[in-house]
Image: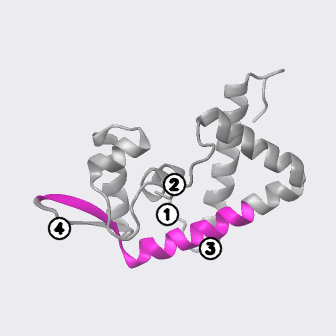
């Protein structure tokens, strides 16, 4: 996609996000996961891998509506990546948990992401890559955080 002359920062970030997301989806399709879309990241990035996560909490973490998250979870459940189970802390509630297939996908996604980041590091060089990461973390307020959702 051609960018306009001197695009603003938001446009550059959006186009970079789209390009990296498309690269990740293509890589995962080659690795045996052709049915996963970029929008599914809303679940995979925010789910507690061991205990599962309530749908409302997934929606909050992903900064999307409960209804939108429900559609993503429904899709992933239909494909066998997640399942809804009774919440052990509140029998009236449900949590979304990864299935074995979902855990394999997450592991493969980590490997694919690492390969994409390694390519970006090679393309930019170590110093520019680290500068870019540091600047982005500062812009979004992550500097000093360790979180692994």
Separation of disc 1 and disc 2 at Cα? 28 Å
Q: Is residue 93 left or right of residue 121?
A: left
Mark nearer the viewer, 3 or 4:
4
- What residue is disc 2 on? 147
Mark nearer the viewer, 4 or 1:
4
Image vertical order of residue 145 relative to residue 51, above or below? above
Q: Is residue 127 left or right of residue 98?
A: right
Q: Which mark is residue 49?
A: none
Separation of disc 4 and disc 1 at Cα? 30 Å
Instruction: Return the residue nearer the eye: 101 or 61.
Output: 61
Q: Residue 26, image x and y in percent? A: 65, 60
Mark nearer the viewer, 1 or 2:
2
Q: Earlier in the sequence, mark 4 or mark 2?
A: 4
Separation of disc 4 and disc 2 at Cα? 24 Å
Where does the magenta region start and end? 92-116
Q: Quadrant of the N terminus?
A: top right
- What residue is disc 3 on? 31
Mark nearer the viewer, 3 or 2:
2
- What residue is disc 4 on? 88
Q: Which mark is residue 35?
A: 1
Image vertical order of residue 75 relative to residue 65, above or below? below
- Judged by its main secondary structure, the magenta piece is helix
């Amino acid at each position: 996609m051609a960018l306009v002359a001197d695009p603003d920062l938001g446009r550059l970030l959006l186009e970079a996000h789209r390009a990296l997301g498309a690269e990740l989806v293509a890589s995962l399709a080659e690795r045996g996961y052709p049915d996963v879309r970029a929008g599914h990241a809303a679940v995979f990035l925010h789910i507690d891998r061991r205990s599962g996560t309530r749908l409302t909490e997934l929606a909050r973490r992903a900064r999307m509506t409960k209804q939108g998250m429900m559609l993503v979870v429904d899709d992933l459940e239909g494909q066998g990546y997640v399942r809804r189970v009774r919440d052990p802390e509140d029998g009236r509630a449900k949590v979304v948990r990864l299935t074995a297939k979902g855990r394999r996908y997450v592991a493969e996604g980590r490997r694919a992401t690492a390969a994409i980041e390694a390519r970006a590091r090679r393309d930019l060089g170590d110093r520019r890559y680290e500068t870019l990461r540091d600047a982005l973390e500062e812009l979004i307020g992550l500097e000093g955080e360790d979180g692994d959702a």
